[in-house]
Amino acid sequence: MEIMTDTPAGITGHTRLGGLIGCPTSHSVSPMMHNDSFRALGLDMVYLCFDVLPEQLGTVIPAFREMQVYGFNITMPDKEAVIPYLDELSPEASLIGAVNTVRFSDGKLIGHNTDGTGFMQAAREQGADVKGREMILLGAGGAASAIAVQAALDGASALHLVCRRSRSWDHAKELVDKISASTACRADLTDLADTAAIRKLTERSFLLVNATSVGMEPNTADSPLTDPSLFHPELIVSDIIYHPRRTRLLQIAEQAGCRTFNGMYMLLWQGAAAFRLWTGRDMPVELIRGRYFSD
C-alpha cells in the first residue's frame, strides 16, 4: 500500500463530505484520524464534526441524505435515537440496538456498530482478552450494549452489567436476557447503588469497563465508582472515555494497584472499521497510532 504522507490538504469540486454527530464533539480525535488517513491514501474526502442533539436528528439526517454524504459516525447521545432515520441496520447494529457508524450506499443510509469490535481489539492489545473470563460493564447505553454483545460473542464466561435504576434499566434487563439466551455467556444485572453486590463481582472478575460518560470532560471530578476498596491489583480497569486520558475512575484504580487503559485504542480500532466501511480501504493504522495514540 502506497502511503502518500506528504499529500497536501485541499478541497476540490469532487470532495465528499462525512463526519461525526453527537454532543459534544469538539474534543474528538476522529477528524484528525480520518482526514490524515484520507490524505495518506490520496482520497478526496473530508471529515467534520457537528454538534447534534437527538431532537435535531429529524432535520440533520435528511440533509445528510440529500447531500449524499459518504457516511458519518455517531457519538452520545444519538446512538439509539438515530435508528428511526435510517433505512437499514447491519446484523450487529440490530442486535445491539445502537449505531455508531452510518454508510451511504445505493441511496440508503445503513447503520453499523463498530464499537464492540473496536473495544475488544483494544482490550486484546492490552492483555485483557476476556475469553473464558468474567467481566463487569458499567452502563447500558449504546457503547455498553456494543461491548456487552461483542464480549459475549468473543467468549466471556460471565458478563455482569451494572447500571442505575433509571430509564435504561429495562433496556439493560432486556440486554442481559438476550445475551444469556443467545450466547454461551452468562449475563446478569446489578444496581449501581448496591455496593456490596459490586464488591462480590469485582472480587471474581478479570476486567471492569466503564462504558458511561461519567468522568468525561468537563466533569472530570466524577466517577461511577469512588470506593478504592472495590478494586484489587488483579483487576484490569478500562474506561472508554479518552478525554481526559486518565479519568478519576482510572486514577482510583491505579492507586489500588490495577492495570488500566483508556478509550483511545477503542477509538482507533472502531475508526479503522468505519473507515473500511466508507472507503473499502484499510486505514493506515500504524501511521495514525504514531501521530495521535502514542502515550
Image: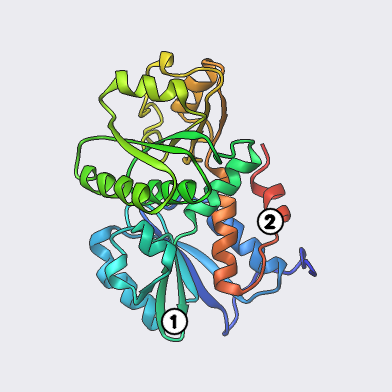
Q: Amino acid at mark 1?
A: Gln
Residue 5 screen position, x and y as percent: 76, 63
Residues marked 2 and 1 touching at CB (< 8 Å): no
Q: Compared with residue 210, is residue 289 higher up or lower down, i.e. above or below?
A: below
**Residue 120 marker:** none
Q: Amino acid at mark 2?
A: Val
Give left or right: position of 68 versus 169.
Answer: right
- Nearest the viewer among 61 and 109 is 109
Task: Identify the secondary structure beneath mark 2.
Answer: helix
Residue at point 64%, 68% (across, down): 38
Residue at point 43%, 44% (across, down): 185
| Alpha carbon separation for disc pair 2 and 1 | 27 Å
Residue at point 53%, 53% (across, down): 117
- Farthest residue to the top: give it: 229
Residue 233 screen position, x and y as percent: 55, 18
Which is more N-terminal, label 1 or label 2?
A: 1
- Nearest the viewer among 208 and 185 is 185
- Nearest the viewer among 156 and 145 is 156
Q: Give the labeled residue for mark 2.
A: 285
**Residue 68 marker:** 1
Q: Compared with residue 159, is residue 51 higher up or lower down, i.e. above or below?
A: below
- Farthest residue to the right: give it: 2
* Nearer to us: label 2 or label 1: 2
- The answer to whether one can see residue 63 in this image is yes
**10 Å neighbourhood of mark 2: few (<14), some, or many (≥20)?**
some
**10 Å neighbourhood of mark 1: few (<14), some, or many (≥20)?**
some
Residue at point 19%, 45% (across, down): 167
Give left or right: position of 172 versus 218.
Answer: left
- The answer to whether one can see residue 217 in this image is no
